[in-house]
Image: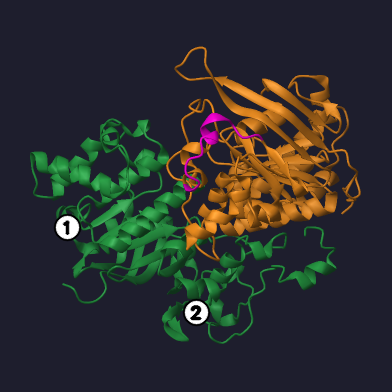
């Protein structure tokens, strides 16, 4: 297949996507004048050919972050640069020009496809939108479908005539139609069965290798994130609390929330680990001063409730190998856990 | 009665519709649940795992009927029990916890009212005793702020609190069997871990039996003693949990387990089961997995494989080839680092 425009050579130092100081506030429900910081002071980079995972639970801000990245809402603070161009404003001309290069695959494969359109029209739509006046190359549509594991017999079908996995393949073909450089994958396998998830994960790996694609994989499923990513950012209450290479994060986390999240996920090899984070996250806007995780923090408990956790929000500090963590006691995260387990 | 298993499901079949429009989403499944045992029912969408739970509870969706088989619960056949008598068992001796507590609870009544309703119906308590019993039940499932939770309507509580309230309601009458249908699937990871931990501790301390319906093999590993793998309304395999996960004997179980992303498979191709679940398995003469199975022989197309012990008495498999093959089924999974190095090793 020769659909690739860029050879899959890892490119140079300058990042493909650079996000700095990104914030998005929403009015707090039922409290006029006050706001909820859905995303606050988020900064990260995605290099060409790299896969970044964004992990978090409900209320972590991952959906708001995705909507800002895609230009579906405008951030209230910060800056988004794509290939060196400022695309922060959702309606700016720079944003419009970036759309070809920055595509998305959503969670709900059936709901994100127009039910009236055939598969052929669904895949042709981005081409028509971005290359108006140019005749649609039917061979190109077919080759896109073949690339995602569909065939000629699917061309005339509509979304309701396809399985969930097939719909997700169509959504991926649409995202690939314009030969993007970065694809945001927003929970791409969450609504799929395990065996279908495996097909989609294999497909995403293949496509990445073949086209030198970069992904931002947003997911709550740590096994999926671990499988596909090079680096992971963990979000809690709108902030990145830890960011590291995938290996480092899973082997030696430096934030008590990330550690709790990794321990909590039931795995086939070892079952569920320790329940470290207790209780629920605080309701929106409840965090005023201090560390946002302190109400559930097992490490703070073990260290005898240090007062600094109540007083100041820990900054995201960089350790060697670009491992960033926002905890006053990040050096203690891996040690006390051993004691807890025994 | 204290002898034998608590629950014995035999050749259970459930049908929708009649004649040409008939479908049979459950087609002759059998399994047992011992006293104090946790049995997982595993499979993908449409395999019949939820329907299995609903059949035991006698709350099948409209239009569905048990067309064959028996559900022996402590010596009583639930499948043929008059609904009035079933109502005395359901909620009291057999209780249930569903996937989505927000829709399983009634939005217009407080948690107190709903749990009291169950207790009043099944236990011979009155007035103060009911209130005390409900409060104690809530405390026992580790809900903080008991009074606030009792006063709350479902929408005022978080998903984790609601699921704990639902577990309290399910356990309020001291059931012998709990049917748990994906109780953590709708919850966040850290909250789901709390709920799983709670269920496990309650089960250990009280010793009730559990039928745990889930699609998540990690959850299976965490909570179950034994697993029944369903495929297209039939039992594909049944085994002690660790045996199944270590050495599955049915090609479908093997594909399912091979499809799970794991640290040692990072960046490598996962197992892919080709094709999709048959829409009308009742009309397939042979094995229902035949169209997706890489190791089919002629016999598979004409003869339905019966569930039989293979190797050990507690390892049951419905596959003609089980026990006769030594090699793994090839579902296209990348077997190891040696071969991925040849492919360029772009991921590691």
Colour displayed for chain B in the image of the structure: green
Give the quarter of the image for residue A43: top right
Chief secondary structure of the magenta portion? loop
Give the quarter of the image for residue B25: bottom left
Seen in the picture, residue B148 relative to B245 is either above or below; the reply is above
- The residue at the point 76 percent across, 28 percent down is A80
For the magenta stretch, what is the residue range?
A302-315
**Picture coordinates of residue B337, whole percent (x, y):** 76, 70
Judging depth in this view, the residue of B284 and B137 nearest the camera is: B137
Residue at the spot of label 1:
B82
Q: Which mark is residue A293?
A: none
- Is the residue at mark 2 from the same chain as the one at mark 1? yes
Quarter occupied by the N terminus of chain B: bottom left
User: Can you see residue B279?
Assistant: no
**Picture coordinates of residue A21, whole percent (x, y):** 71, 27
| Element at label 2 | loop
- The residue at the point 49 percent across, 79 percent down is B303
Judging depth in this view, the residue of A70 and A76 nearest the camera is: A76
Of circles 2 and 1, the one toward us is 1
| Element at label 1 | loop
**Sooner in the amino-acid sequence: mark 2 or mark 1:** 1
User: Can you see residue B315?
Assistant: yes
Q: Is residue B198 left or right of residue A38?
A: left
**Picture coordinates of residue B119, whole percent (x, y):** 17, 46
Rounded to the nearest whole Å, what is the CA distance between mark 2 and mark 1? Answer: 36 Å
Residue A307 forms part of the magenta stretch:
yes
Residue at the spot of label 2:
B303
Q: Residues within 10 Å of mark 2 (few under 14, many from 20)?
A: few
Q: Which chain is orange?
A: A
């Amino acid at each position: 297949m020769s659909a690739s425009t860029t050879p899959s050579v890892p490119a140079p130092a300058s990042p493909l996507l650079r996000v700095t100081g990104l914030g998005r506030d929403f009015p707090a429900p039922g409290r006029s004048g006050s706001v909820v910081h859905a995303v606050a002071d988020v900064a990260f980079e995605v290099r060409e050919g790299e896969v970044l995972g964004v992990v978090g639970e409900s209320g972590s801000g991952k959906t708001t972050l995705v909507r800002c990245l895609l230009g579906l809402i405008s951030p209230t603070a910060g800056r988004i640069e794509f290939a060196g161009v400022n695309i922060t404003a959702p309606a700016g001309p720079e944003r419009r020009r970036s759309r070809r290069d920055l595509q998305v695959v959503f969670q709900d494969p059936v709901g994100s496809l127009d039910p009236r359109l055939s598969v052929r029209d669904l895949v042709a739509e981005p081409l028509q939108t971005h290359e108006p006046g140019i005749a649609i190359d039917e061979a190109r549509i077919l080759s896109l479908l073949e690339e995602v594991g569909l065939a000629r017999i699917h061309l005339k079908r509509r979304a309701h005539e396809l399985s969930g996995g097939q719909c997700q393949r169509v959504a991926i073909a649409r995202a690939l139609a314009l030969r993007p450089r970065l694809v945001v994958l927003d929970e791409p396998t969450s609504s799929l069965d395990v065996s279908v998830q495996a097909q989609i994960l294999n497909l995403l790996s293949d496509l990445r290798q073949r086209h030198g694609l970069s992904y931002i994989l947003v997911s709550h499923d740590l096994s999926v994130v671990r499988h596909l990513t090079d680096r992971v950012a963990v979000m809690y209450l709108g902030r990145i609390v830890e960011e590291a290479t995938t290996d480092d994060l899973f082997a030696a986390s430096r934030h008590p929330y990330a550690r709790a999240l990794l321990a909590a996920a039931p795995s086939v090899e070892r079952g569920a680990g320790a329940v470290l984070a207790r209780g629920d996250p605080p309701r929106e806007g409840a965090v005023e001063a201090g560390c946002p995780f302190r109400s559930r923090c097992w490490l703070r408990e073990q260290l005898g409730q240090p007062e600094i956790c109540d007083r100041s929000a820990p900054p995201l500090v960089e350790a060697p190998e670009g491992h960033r963590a926002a905890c006053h006691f990040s050096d203690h995260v891996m040690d006390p856990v051993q004691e807890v387990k025994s | 009665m204290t002898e034998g298993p608590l629950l014995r499901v035999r050749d259970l079949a459930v049908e929708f519709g009649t004649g040409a429009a008939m479908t049979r989403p459950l087609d002759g499944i059998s399994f047992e649940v011992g006293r104090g045992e946790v049995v997982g029912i595993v499979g993908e969408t449409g395999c019949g795992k939820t329907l299995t739970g609903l059949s035991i509870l006698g709350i099948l969706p409209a239009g569905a009927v048990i067309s064959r088989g028996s559900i022996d619960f402590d010596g009583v056949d639930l499948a043929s029990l008059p609904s009035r008598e079933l109502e005395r068992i359901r909620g009291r001796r057999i209780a249930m916890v569903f996937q989505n507590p927000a829709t399983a609870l009634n939005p217009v009544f407080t948690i107190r009212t709903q749990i009291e309703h169950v207790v009043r119906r099944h236990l011979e308590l009155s007035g103060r005793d009911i209130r005390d019993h409900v409060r104690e039940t809530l405390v026992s499932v580790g809900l903080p702020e008991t009074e606030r939770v009792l006063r709350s309507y479902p929408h005022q509580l978080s998903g984790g609190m609601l699921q704990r309230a639902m577990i309290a309601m399910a356990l309020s009458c001291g059931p012998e069997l709990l049917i748990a249908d994906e109780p953590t699937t709708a919850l966040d990871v850290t909250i789901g871990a709390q709920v799983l931990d709670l269920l496990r501790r309650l089960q250990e301390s009280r010793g009730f039996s559990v039928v745990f319906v889930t699609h998540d093999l990690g959850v299976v590993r965490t909570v179950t003693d034994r697993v029944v793998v369903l495929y297209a309304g039939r039992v594909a395999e049944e085994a002690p949990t660790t045996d199944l996960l270590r050495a599955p004997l049915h090609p479908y179980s093997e594909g399912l387990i091979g499809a799970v992303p794991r640290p040692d498979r990072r960046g490598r191709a996962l197992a892919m089961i080709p094709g999709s679940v048959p829409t009308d398995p009742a009309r397939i003469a042979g094995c229902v997995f035949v169209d997706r199975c890489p190791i089919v022989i002629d016999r598979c197309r004409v003869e339905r494989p019966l569930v039989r012990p293979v190797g050990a008495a507690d390892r049951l498999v419905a596959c003609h080839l089980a026990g006769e093959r030594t090699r793994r089924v090839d579902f296209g999974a990348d077997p190891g680092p040696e071969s991925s190095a040849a492919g360029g090793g772009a991921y590691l």
